[in-house]
Amino acid sequence: MKLGIGARITALFGLGALVLSILMGGLSYFTTRHFLLAGRETAAQHQAFANAVLVRSELQGGNTHYVSLLASIDAGTDAHSVLYHQSKSYVSSLSVNASSIPRKLRKVVLGGNAATQTYRTAQGVAEIAVGVPVPSVHAAYFEVFDLSDLDHTLRVLGLTLFGAGAVTTLLGISLGRFASARSLRPLADVSRAAGAIAGGELDTRLDPDAADPDLEGLTISFNAMVDQLQERIEREARFNSDVSHELRSPLTTLAASLEVLERDREDLPPRSQRALQLLSDDLRRFQRMVADLLEMSRADAGSVDVFLEEVSVSELVQRSVVAGFGHMDGHGHGAPPEVRIDPVVQSWRVGVDKRRFERVMVNLMENAAHYGGGVTEIAVGPGEAEHVEVTVDDAGPGIDPQERAKVFERFYRGSASGRRGAGTGTGLGLALVAEHMHAMQGDVRVESSPGGGARFVLSLPVLSEDDDPEGAA
Amino acid sequence: MSGRILVVEDDERIRSSMRLALEGEGYEVRDAASGEEGLDLFAEAPTDVALIDLMLPGMDGFECCRALRRSSAVPIIIVTARADTHDVVAGLEAGADDYVTKPFVAKELAARIRALLRRARPAEEEPGALTFGDLQLLPEQGVLRHLNGEEVHCTRTEFRLLCELAASPNKVLSREQLLDRVWGYDYFGDGRLVDVHIRRLRTKVEADPAVPQHILTVRGMGYKLVP
């Protein structure tokens, strides 16, 4: 698993605090221990030497009453003496015996050198033993000091330092968390801005005044990037719009002039009449294409103002099918398809741009005619969550599930559309259906019809149920 | 049917083809390449319908509409590049009666002109004189006046719209019905035509257009006139 930058900063701060507290804690512990121990050692040595001098003078004086001799030595409450004389050992208290003296120390001292050793007994008690040889009387004097109090002090100190270290580490972690949140906040701003831009709000910018001085560079370059992006998108949209726009003027001239010719059609020789027919058919197609392209570029430029009117959905669909059938491109033969209306939705009202909706129906009916063997049924019924659904079924081979999302892409031509006969569309028909539906807060999807063909489903939010359908009449 | 049409359009080819097509439909056409020239031509000779492109060099179409409206109630059709922008509403608010989008079909344009030239059609219930507020509507004479005799100037389309509403007072008329009766549009007519004309009418007949007392909006349904 990869750690996020926030977690890494937090971990780094925690680790830093841990290392620092170990270092500081260790240093103060061992320094204190060293000084305390050294002090005790020096004191012990002074006492042991002083007592050894006393023992020597007593032994030289011929006093061999060892027990009273040892008892007479003022060793303090937590010190005990051991005396070796003529290969025998004598102790000052029951709590020590000759084996209490570490062997190594004994060996060194009996060898004629004074020595000191700090150690821990088998019972876990810390002690310091000082040995002083007294060669003039062939004796060795040892004194053993109990270090329990020092040990206790050091243990308390250790625990305190450990606790302080733990607290410091925790503080480091929380500081790290705070610092990472703090330092990542500008990035969160950037991410939010980028999200808004991706969502189409091209005017979004980072506030250069609010930015951290260290991140000024990022803010400036981010804003510059968005400026450029916006300019490029707008330039492209403007170009598309300009092209379609410029095509419009000659189209207007062509259409008006052609109508003059059509008015005099009967006076033309048959060959010219056929040529005129071709001309006017393709001019109509051309007009549709330019209109579609323009519609698309407008949607891209986000410059579409949609005016929604509240209408009865059943009337809307019926009227759109009839009117749209008349506007279909070369396939509007026979009678327009029947519309089956679920009685439940009869009085439902929706907010639409009627002409856009008619365009949607024309495009779906044309699509069915071109690629789906014609419309088999158009139905209006209730959908999910306060929506009404309009379904358009065709008699074609249906659309593969993996192709379904793509059919609404621009210029997408499915596998079924290899043939390019007269009057096939611009490749924008279904993309515009989606565009129009979204502009009206609706949506479109494709499924399979019960008969195996494709079923296009338009859904629109229901505005209200008209209790009195005659009210408007 | 004949009529005298003034075409204001800066593109020479479109102008020529419109002239040909409209003359083919039996109209008498005069054309101008700019708003200023259009206003001059309008002042020179009587005109039945003015056709004004919104995108004109110099004085633009909106300005031209407003200038015409200041002196005349002549029906105006604006020619716009796009139907789905604020241009349409702005043009209507500048005084236009109707609009067509490029590229238009001359037959469609001729139909729009015919609808505007048509006399107020005899409604099923011919509206008699009607008084509402301190206003008196005399459909026969084509006059709307204050009770003190002062005439209220409104365009032909505004007057016809008022007559349709007055023909059935207190009854809601849908946008579709008004579009059909006043402009001759079918179901797919643009409801904004009705909305903007109602707004314009209110500035003339209501004491406070923001709080209308006579021409009321019935949400989702349409409009009604309350005497």
Image (cartoon, rainbow, N blue to C red):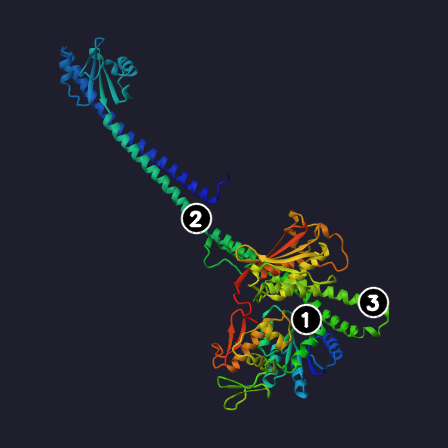
- Callout 1: residue from which chain? B
Q: Amino acid at mark 2?
A: Ala
- Report the front residue among B73 and A16: B73
Circle 3 or circle 2, nearest the eye: 3
Q: Which residue is mark 3?
A: A274
Do the numbered discs 1 and 3 sit on residues whose CB atoms are within 8 Å? no
Where is residue B142 shown, x and y percent of the image? 59, 86
Image height of A119 relative to A353, above or below: above
Q: Are marks 1 and 3 on the same chain?
A: no
Give the Cα separation between the discs numbered 2 and 1.
Answer: 57 Å
Farthest bottom residue in view? B149
Query: Which residue does the numbered mark 1 point to in the structure image?
Result: B102
Q: Which residue is mark 2?
A: A181
Tell me the element at label 1.
loop
What is the secondary structure assignment of the residue under circle 2? Answer: helix
- How would you rate the neighbour count of disc 2 (Cα within 10 Å): few for under 14, some for 14-19, many for 20 or more? some
Identified at 51% across, 70% down, the residue is B219
